[in-house]
Amino acid sequence: GDFYDVFPLDGTRFGFFLGDVCGKGPQAAAVTSLTRYTLRAAALHDPEPFSALTTLNKVLHERYAAGGDPRYCTAVYGVLEPDQTTGEVTVRLASGGHPPAIVVRADGTADFLPTPGGLLVGILPSAPFVSATTVLAPGDTLLLYTDGITEARTGDDRTGFFGDDALLAFVAGQAGNPPSALIESLTGLLKDFGDGLDDDTALLALGPQAPDPQTRSDR
């Protein structure tokens, strides 16, 4: 039950989210549909990331946990706010139990954007979600993903896991490439896992366009 979306909030800002509904089958599909609808509706009412996740948490908990059939998900919801003058994009996000986003810099570095301690969405009546902020310069990329990629089994006997560190190193090797190229490389990596891939993986890469070297004036 992976899900993601990117959508305009107003004339300048965009909302985005990515997450993973626990479970499979028709029930998980119903929760996925409700989650997508709720996040978009909540974002249009109050786009602050913490508020959007809080609304989703309330809806899922009241809809399912109160009836004795708890359903929950991991989720990251955020807002992109471009600066037309500098070309930079301010990212504000909140996470509920989801793997940390990765910030890939145009200079070749990459690191996790820490969001430790956020609880699964829908599991409790009130959940302490974790917020984070970063700024993307032109050529930088924000990568969101579900845990299917880090939990892919590796090695000849398929007993190891790809893991967070290997993902970070792989992504750092793609620094400077546009988001579409990063997704293409990660898709190839997923195919290479073959039967070591036990779960679906959703990927979302966002970032301001790098300046075209041909348009720069010589100094």
Image: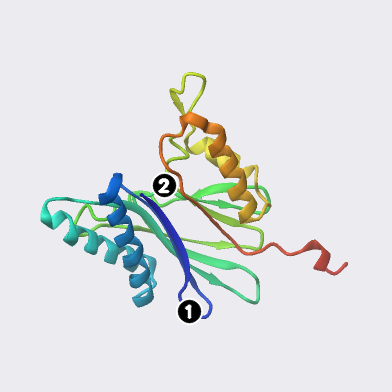
Left or right of residue 13: residue 106: right
Q: How many residues crowd mark 2 within 10 Å: few (<14), some (14–19), many (20+)?
A: many
**Amino acid at circle 2:** Pro
The quarter holding residue 200 reads: top left
- The residue that appears at 83% across and 64% down in the rendered structure is 214
Please identify the residue farthest to the bottom as the structure is shown.
Answer: 11
Looking at the rendered structure, the number of numbered marks drawn on it comes to: 2
Tell me: residue 77, above or below residue 113.
Answer: below
Residue 189: percent from left, percent from top:
57, 38
Q: Which mark is residue 172?
A: none
- The residue that appears at 46% across and 23% down in the rendered structure is 158
The quarter holding residue 185 reads: top right
Give the residue number, with chain letter if any, for mark 2. 99
Q: N-terminal of the two: label 1 or label 2?
A: 1
Can the viewer see residue 119? no
Left or right of residue 81: residue 213: right
The C terminus lies in which quarter of the figure?
A: bottom right
Left or right of residue 64: residue 203: right
Give the residue number, with chain letter if any, for mark 1. 10
